[in-house]
Amino acid sequence: MRNIEDIPEIPDRKTRLDEITVDCYGREEELAAFEVYLTDALHPPFAATWRDPDEAGHAEPITVLGVADVDDRRGILLNVRRRRGGKERRVLAEQVWADDATSANGIVLDDYRSWVDHGGLDEDDEYY
């Protein structure tokens, strides 16, 4: 098992996801493991884009400030600030794309989004 902050350096996503969830039994433990992964492996603040799925074509430049909270139903929430000024807000991590997609930040967010997209927040589904 590797240090969690080193996981983004693994080239293969499946191997990264296996490392993150190695000792997890069920969705709640996997979500907790991803909270640790995002908390330890993200390097805030960093430039990103928030895409709200409820608004077609919505893409807003933001700065990610860090992990805000975890909601058992909704998943991981990030603290962000609009780049053109404004107050801090919380957005779902799977709605955030790092501007540098090849950075550790981009990889971590992509790993979490992959887990969510493949049933990570639905208790009965596998993420692969």
Image (cartoon, rainbow, N blue to C red):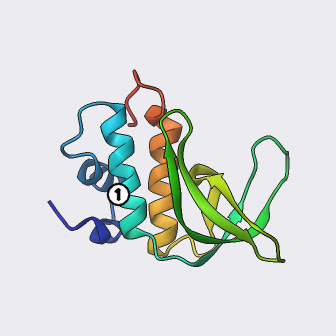
Which residue is drawn at the image coordinates 30% and 65% (left, top)?
7
x and y percentages locating residue 74 in the rendered image: 56, 38
Count neighbours of disc 1 (C-alpha within 10 A) and say few if under 14, some if 14 to 19, many if 20 or more. Answer: some
Question: In the rendered view of the protein, which quadrant contains the N terminus?
Answer: bottom left
Foreground of the two, 123 or 90 = 90
Foreground of the two, 93 or 66 = 66
- Secondary structure at numbered mark 1: helix
Foreground of the two, 76 or 97 = 76
Foreground of the two, 8 or 43 = 43
Q: Amino acid at mark 1?
A: Val
x and y percentages locating residue 97 in the rendered image: 62, 62
> Relative to 11, is 120 above or below?
above
x and y percentages locating residue 34 in the rendered image: 38, 51
Question: In the rendered view of the protein, which quadrant contains the C terminus?
Answer: top left
User: Residue tagged by mark 1?
Assistant: 36
Which residue is drawn at the image coordinates 31% and 56% (left, top)?
16
Snapshot quadrant of residue 48: bottom right
> In the visual, does 34 lie left or right of 65?
left
> Relative to 6, is 52 above or below?
above
x and y percentages locating residue 62 in the rendered image: 72, 70
Snapshot quadrant of residue 61: bottom right
Which residue is drawn at the image coordinates 48% and 75% (left, top)?
103
Find the residue positioned furthest to the left: 1
Find the residue positioned furthest to the top: 124
Which residue is drawn at the image coordinates 71% and 70% (left, top)?
81
